[in-house]
Amino acid sequence: MGEKLLKGATEFLFEPQVEDVLGSPAPHYLNFQMYQILLEAKASEHSSRMVAMKNATDNAKELIKDLTLEYKQTSPGQHYQRTFGNYQCRYGNGLTI
C-alpha cells in the first residue's frame, strides 16, 4: 500500500484478493457455457431425427396410398399374373398356371 492515492479517492480493501474474487466464477462460467453448448447440440440432433422420421412416415403413408389406389384399379387376374408372373421371371417356369 505504498502507492499514493489521489486527493478525494477512496481506498478499498478486498478480502480475499481481487484475483481470487474475480477468478473463482470464471471456471464455473466456462463449465456452464460448455454444458449449455452440449445440451443445445443434443437437442438439435434430436430435433433433426424427429423431422427425418416424420418425413419418412409421411412418405411411406403417401406410397401406401398410391399403391392401394393402383391395386384397387386393377383386376384380380392382373394381381395373380403380376405375382406369379414375377415369380416365373425370377425363378424359371417351375410353376404351372
Image (cartoon, grey):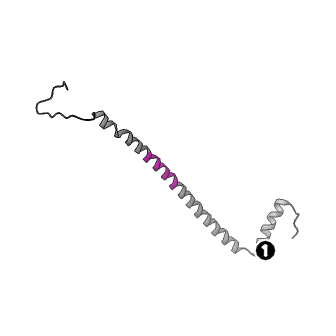
Report the magenta stretch's main SS.
helix
Task: Provide residue 56's location: percent of width, then percent of height.
Answer: 59, 60
Task: Provide residue 94's location: percent of width, then percent of height.
Answer: 88, 63
Which stretch appears magenta?
Answer: 35-47
Q: As displayed, is residue 60 above or below residue 8?
A: below
**Residue 6 part of the magenta segment:** no
**Residue 36 part of the magenta segment:** yes
Q: In the rendered image, which quarter contains the C terminus?
A: bottom right
Residue beneath the point at 87% across and 66% down:
95
Foreground residue, 58 or 40? 40
Task: Provide residue 67's location: percent of width, then percent of height.
Answer: 67, 68
Extreme-front residue of the structure:
15
**Hey, what amino acid is under mark 1?**
Gly
Q: Is residue 96 left or right of residue 74?
A: right
Residue beneath the point at 15% across and 34% down:
10
Q: What residue is disc 1 on?
A: 77
Q: Is residue 97 left or right of residue 68?
A: right
Q: As displayed, is residue 10 above or below residue 81?
A: above
Q: In the rendered image, which quarter contains the N terminus?
A: top left
Q: What is the crowding at mark 1: few (fewer than 14 residues within 10 Å), some, or many (at least 20)? A: few
Q: Is residue 18 left or right of residue 65?
A: left
Foreground residue, 88 or 44? 44
Disc 1 secondary structure class: helix
Residue beneath the point at 48% across and 53% down:
43
Residue beneath the point at 72% across and 73% down:
74
Q: As displayed, is residue 46 above or below residue 11?
A: below
Task: Provide residue 30's location: percent of width, then percent of height.
Answer: 40, 41
